[in-house]
Image: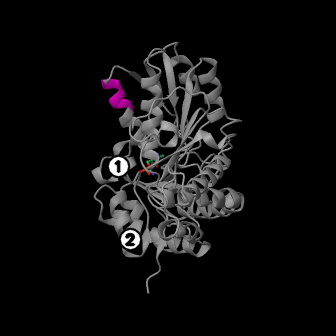
């Protein structure tokens, strides 16, 4: 049987077996509606509050009431940006974000621009680090919200959130952080880092899909974007996804308990993969920050070939990886994140994204390193752009 090496965890993760076990009773035995006061309702409500506490703990929130469960990070980002922008319109109409955010931030900003908001997209350096000096210059008294991701899941770069937070709060604005890629991999502390709103996705911490959360610091002025039965303190109407929320809580608990050891393990595997590629494949480069990057992220580029061709060749050998953000790769447009770091279109197209996860082993890395140089060489031989000397001995 062909070996299967899954290295696309930014796009989708398996649900942890312990999470599924925790969820099961809430499908078949404990299915009460948490809004009701009978025994099954009370049981359900209690389970949700336990999950809320676990999610709060993962990000250092001081009160569990600061967590609102949503249907995923897209909804969390929509609620954070629209909810804060529209509620604080009397204070200003200026929002600052970065050019490397997820589409669920960028497209919400585009929509808010149509509603009269002014949006500033901050540049990043060649490693994908947000320009804090540019942030200082762009802040005005009309700036109500700044939205910057904790880390970029595509190039792995971790952003200077504390520094950004200081600038934002010096100017009296609010800070929203999309922590989908960072959560469960690196420590997050919304108190120490003074974050006002923070988005999370359950699947990115090995929980079920279709669940997410938004941390909202107590006292933050925000309005709901879904109206209905008033669940989640009126901020997110709709009958709660009970098994999903229980699953996300369990996933947060496991992530918090295992993060330190697991992240150290993944960093070793990631570095082996990156070093192995750069040493054995000529004209290959690392995308993103060389050291300040997520433990599970290796994004590399190869001159003279298309990432898509590489993905298909690796897939035929059982290795699953990606060319960029799962959400935009369907369009075959080069990644906006890679372009923002200054790469040319053809450089962005020649990039491969490996995102590691819990089931990956050292053998997996060796398997990829055994295959990749040969595949790259074969594709380069076929490419009319490849300089002859690079493939001379074939
Ligand atoms: N933000 C980031 C950084 C993401 O990678 C994603 C996709 N996992 C989202 C937001 C949106 O998450 P979802 O598709 O679960 O709504």
- Secondary element at tag 2: helix
Please report the bounds of the magenta region as a residue range. Answer: 109-114
Q: Is residue 378 left or right of residue 21?
A: left
Q: Residue 209 location, x and y as percent?
A: 45, 58
**Relative height, residue 237 to residue 306 (above, below):** above
Q: Is residue 291 magenta?
A: no
Q: Which residue is mark 2?
A: 315
Examine the rendered structure and indicate whether residue 380 appears above or below residue 112. below
Q: Position of residue 260 (x, y in %)?
A: 71, 57
Q: Which residue is label 1 attached to?
A: 328
- Which residue sits furthest bottom? 1
Looking at the image, can residue 100 be seen? Answer: no
Magenta span main SS: helix
- Which residue is rendered at x = 39% and y = 48% of the image? 347
Q: Nearer the viewer, residue 81 or 163?
A: 81
Which residue appears farthest toward the front when viewing the image? 38
**In the image, is residue 322 above or below residue 114?**
below
Is the C terminus in the top left, top right, bottom left or bottom right quadrant?
bottom left
State the separation of the CA atoms marked 1 and 2: 19 Å
Q: Is residue 358 visible?
A: yes
Which residue is at the front of the view, 90 or 172?
90
Instruction: Tell me which numbered mark, 1 or 2, is placed earlier along the sequence.
Output: 2
Is residue 198 shown above or below 365?
above
């Amino acid at each position: 049987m062909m070996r299967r090496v899954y290295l696309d965890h930014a796009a989708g993760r398996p649900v942890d077996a312990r999470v599924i076990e925790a969820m099961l009773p809430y499908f078949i035995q404990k299915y009460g509606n948490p809004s009701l006061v009978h025994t099954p309702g009370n049981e359900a409500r209690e389970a949700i509050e336990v999950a809320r506490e676990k999610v709060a703990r993962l990000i250092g929130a001081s009160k569990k009431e600061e967590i609102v469960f949503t249907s995923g990070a897209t909804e969390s980002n929509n609620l954070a940006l629209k909810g804060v922008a529209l509620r604080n319109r009397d204070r200003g109409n200026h929002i600052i974000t970065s050019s490397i955010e997820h589409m669920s931030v960028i497209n919400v900003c585009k929509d808010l621009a149509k509603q009269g908001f002014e949006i500033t997209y901050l540049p990043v350096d060649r490693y994908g680090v947000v320009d804090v000096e540019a942030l200082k210059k762009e802040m005005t008294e009309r700036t109500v919200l700044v939205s910057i991701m904790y880390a970029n899941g595509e190039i792995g770069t971790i952003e200077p959130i504390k520094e950004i937070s200081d600038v934002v709060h010096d100017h009296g604005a609010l800070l929203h952080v999309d922590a989908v890629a960072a959560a469960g991999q690196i420590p997050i502390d919304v108190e120490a880092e003074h974050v006002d709103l923070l988005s999370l996705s359950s699947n990115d911490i090995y929980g079920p899909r279709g669940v997410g959360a938004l941390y909202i610091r107590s006292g933050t002025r925000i309005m709901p974007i879904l109206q209905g039965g008033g669940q989640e303190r009126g901020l997110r109407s709709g009958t709660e996804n009970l098994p999903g929320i229980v699953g996300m809580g369990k996933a947060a608990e496991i992530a918090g308990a295992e993060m330190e050891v697991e992240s150290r393990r993944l960093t070793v595997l990631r570095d082996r993969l990156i070093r192995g590629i750069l040493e054995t494949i000529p004209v290959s480069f690392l995308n993103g920050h060389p050291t300040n990057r997520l433990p599970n992220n290796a994004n590399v580029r190869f001159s003279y070939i298309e990432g898509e061709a590489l993905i298909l060749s690796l897939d035929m050998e059982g290795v699953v990886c990606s060319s960029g953000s799962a959400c935009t790769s369907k369009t075959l447009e080069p990644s906006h994140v890679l372009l923002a770091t200054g790469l040319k279109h053809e450089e962005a197209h020649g990039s491969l994204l490996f995102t590691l996860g819990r089931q990956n082993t050292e053998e997996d890395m060796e398997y990829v390193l055994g295959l990749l140089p040969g595949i790259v060489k074969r594709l380069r031989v076929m490419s009319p752009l490849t300089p002859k000397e690079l493939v001379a001995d074939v």
